[in-house]
Amino acid sequence: MNTPFVGKREYFRGIGRIPYEGRESDNPLAFKHYDASRKIGDKTMAEHLRFAVCYWHSFCNAGHDPFGPGTRRYPWDAGDTPMARAEARMDAAFEFFTKLGTPYYCFHDIDMAPDADDVAQYEQNLRHMVALAKERQQATGMKLLWGTANLFSHPRYMNGAATNPDFAVVARAAVQIKAALEATVELGGSNYVFWGGREGYASLHNTQMKRELEHFARFLAMARDYGRSIGFKGNFLIEPKPMEPMKHQYDFDSSTVAGFLKAHGLERDFKLNIEANHATLSGHTFEHDLQVASDHDLLGSIDANRGNAQNGWDTDQFPSDLYDTVGAMLVVLRQGGLAPGGLNFDAKLRRESTDAEDLFIAHIGGMDTFARGLEVAHALLTRSPLEQWRTDRYASFDTGDGRAFAEGRLGMEDLRAHAVAHGEPVQRSGKQERYENLVNQFLLRA
Ligand code: XLS
Ligand code: CA
Ligand code: CA
């Protein structure tokens, strides 16, 4: 089999390009639903789903957890120097992307290049690796969905980055944002992400929250202005998360971030990157936070993963729940798509998954789960009564007094007069079970 790789050596030997074999296939290294060129409505699956692989979980995380070290031995981690390891990691990453057939990837500055406390050294390391990434992109056709900066791992950021109570740390954070923006522009990235790593607090006793939030808005506006000044035309994306690592994270959920962006006049340049597991941590469903973002016209991109109902933390598992992906794709299709955003697998293998093929198997499963979610959501929207039922439920606002109310032409006296004239409202069933049965009926259909 043709084994595409562009680096110095092949890391995933014995695994070729992942084929589409259809739903009857038993091959764990084949797609059962994701058929990149198949049309669903007016777009191909690849155009709808815009899948991306993330650099950090897939190539930097060997499975460590708070109780023990990594369990996987990555051959690209064997080099003598940090730079040799970074170069080998990039070869492995591009080989993986190409074999899997995802069009996009995402990275943090220090996933890709060795970190350094010395500012000039840090910048030089990143520039070196960005130049290599650019060559690899050209050789493989891979594209960058988004870039970002890691402002949460280094101990200097323990009290936050842009919201740190010490200006020296805020300024140091700007070094990384500036460099990561430059890297994103150089690599033709479609978006730039801000996940508020440690932007939040552990205790209100030592925190002036209002001040920190003002600094945060100032910092984001500055980053936007710099990004635009160097030619970045894409979306800036804020990624909400309610907690972890901080007790309270400022970008709590879609609703909180929408309010924050609007309060600071940032809503034209910034949209939201919604992660499934972050939505569930905030006490919502994935679909809820997507819907809130979309209703504000702010749904920019998705971090595709899932949590675990028994755990209260961010487990970042690969998506495997069809019900979730149908719900997500209903929101995406109703808003007319995700572009220039996409579906980034911000998901990690379980610590116990230690074979090289497991990384492929995990992504194949996630891609198939979203592909099937797309098919079912599209069928529900175009071949089922779902939209009509929803429209009919609100029909009383389409004409007469209901319409006048919705358009702001009635007052309290008018509503009272309507109530008197029409008597006790007729009971109308919400029919939740009928909707649920409809979704299952389409999920079970071939
Ligand atoms: C962590 C976040 C992070 C962002 C990028 O919980 O999901 O990985 O997506 O900084
Ligand atoms: Ca994420
Ligand atoms: Ca996460």
Image (spheres, rainbow, N blue to C red):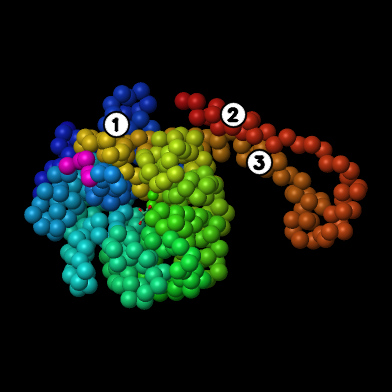
Say which amino acid is labelled 2. Asn
Residue bounds of the magenta highlight: 69-73
366, 170: nearer the viewer = 170
Above or below, comparing residue 335 to residue 221 in the picture? above
Q: Residue furthest front?
A: 205
Q: How many marks?
A: 3
Say which amino acid is labelled 3. Arg
Question: Where does the image place residue 439, in percent across and percent down from the top left?
Answer: 55, 32
Q: Residues within 10 Å of mark 3 (few under 14, many from 20)?
A: few
Q: Which residue is mark 1?
A: 30
Q: Is residue 430 left or right of residue 71?
A: right
Marks 3 and 2 sit apart, C-alpha to C-alpha, by: 15 Å
The N terminus is located in which quarter? Answer: top left
Q: Is residue 379 left or right of residue 414?
A: left
315, 89: nearer the viewer = 315
Q: Predominant secondary structure in magenta?
A: loop
Above or below, comparing residue 270 to residue 400 in the picture? below
Question: Where does the image place residue 174, in percent across and percent down from the top left?
Answer: 33, 72
Secondary structure type for disc 2? helix
Q: Which residue is mark 3?
A: 390
Kindly report which numbered mark, 3 or 2, lies closer to the viewer in this rendering.
Answer: 2
Say which amino acid is labelled 1. Ala
Q: Which residue is pictured at 22% across the width and 44% down the height?
A: 70
Above or below, comparing residue 276 to residue 376 in the picture? below
Q: Which residue is mark 2?
A: 437
Secondary structure type for disc 3? helix
Q: Which residue is pictured at 82% across the width and 52% down the height?
A: 401
Label of residue 17 in the image: none
Q: Is residue 420 left or right of residue 126?
A: right
Q: Is mark 2 within 8 Å of ligand 3?
A: no
Displayed-image quarter of ligand 1: bottom left
Residue 71 lies within the magenta run = yes
